[in-house]
């Protein structure tokens, strides 16, 4: 059963996938940090505009996360979250970006806060009501498109918020 609390982190996760086709298909010369930054900005726009029609085309058909959730599970969770929340603001801070095995893969750790109000800076986090998560994202290039291949997330701990 999909619960409200299980859907909260997935909205960012799904949002990260929404514009990957447009961003990554034209970004062969960009470094991975730039690609991830562009990806996050586009995802925030998708969430703000509540556009999720093409999500199924942007998650790998082979998607499997650490909780055995599939592509279809992610889509269902995102839809449920969008129906429950009128206002979704995302604050994100990439912590690491790596290229694990080849130029066809990208891994990233991203600190994410979901809130009903805009969060401008990490310093605001202790003063606002937000759900804060640490995401481990794995993207893979399939043909000329980048797609979400696997991920994991957990609630962020105090040590995760100590950003240099």
Image (cartoon, rainbow, N blue to C red):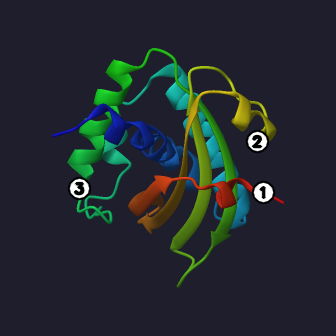
Residue 34: x and y in percent read 73, 57
- Identify the residue under disc 1: 163
Dot 3 or dot 2, earlier in sequence: 3
Farthest residue to the left: give it. 1
3 and 2 marks in contact (CB < 8 Å): no
Relative placement, left or right, of 14 versus 23 is: left
Cα gap from disc 1 to disc 3, whole angstroms: 32 Å
Image vertical order of residue 47 relative to residue 41, above or below: above
Circle 3 crowding by C-alpha within 10 Å: few under 14, some 14–19, many from 20? some
Cα gap from disc 3 to disc 2, whole angstroms: 31 Å
Circle 1 crowding by C-alpha within 10 Å: few under 14, some 14–19, many from 20? few
Residue 136: x and y in percent read 51, 63
Dot 1 or dot 3, earlier in sequence: 3
Q: Quadrant of the N terminus?
A: top left
- Identify the residue under disc 2: 122
Relative placement, left or right, of 95 versus 43 is: right
- Identify the residue under disc 3: 70
Residue ID at (47%, 65%): 138
Residue ID at (65%, 55%): 158
Q: Nearer the viewer, residue 107 or 134?
A: 134
Farthest residue to the bottom: give it. 101
Mark 2 lies on a secondary structure that is helix
Residue ID at (65%, 44%): 92
Dot 1 or dot 2, earlier in sequence: 2
1 and 2 marks in contact (CB < 8 Å): yes
Farthest residue to the top: give it. 86
Image vertical order of residue 117 relative to residue 153, above or below: above
Circle 2 crowding by C-alpha within 10 Å: few under 14, some 14–19, many from 20? some
Q: Nearer the viewer, residue 65 or 59?
A: 65
Q: Quadrant of the C terminus?
A: bottom right
Residue 135: x and y in percent read 52, 56
């Amino acid at each position: 059963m999909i619960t409200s609390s299980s859907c909260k982190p997935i909205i960012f996760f799904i949002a990260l996938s929404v514009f990957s086709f447009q961003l990554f298909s034209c970004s062969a010369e960009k470094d991975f940090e730039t690609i991830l930054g562009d990806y996050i900005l586009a995802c925030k726009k998708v969430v703000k505009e509540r556009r999720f029609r093409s999500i199924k085309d942007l998650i790998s058909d082979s998607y499997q996360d650490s909780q055995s959730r599939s592509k279809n599970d992610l889509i269902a969770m995102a839809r449920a979250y969008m129906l429950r929340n009128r206002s979704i603001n995302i604050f994100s801070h990439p912590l690491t970006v790596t290229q694990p095995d080849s130029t066809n893969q990208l891994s990233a750790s991203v600190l994410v806060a979901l809130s009903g109000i805009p969060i401008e800076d990490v310093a605001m986090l202790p003063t606002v009501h937000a759900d804060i998560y640490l995401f481990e994202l794995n993207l893979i290039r399939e043909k000329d498109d980048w797609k979400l291949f696997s991920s994991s997330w957990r609630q962020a701990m105090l040590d995760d918020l100590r950003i240099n």
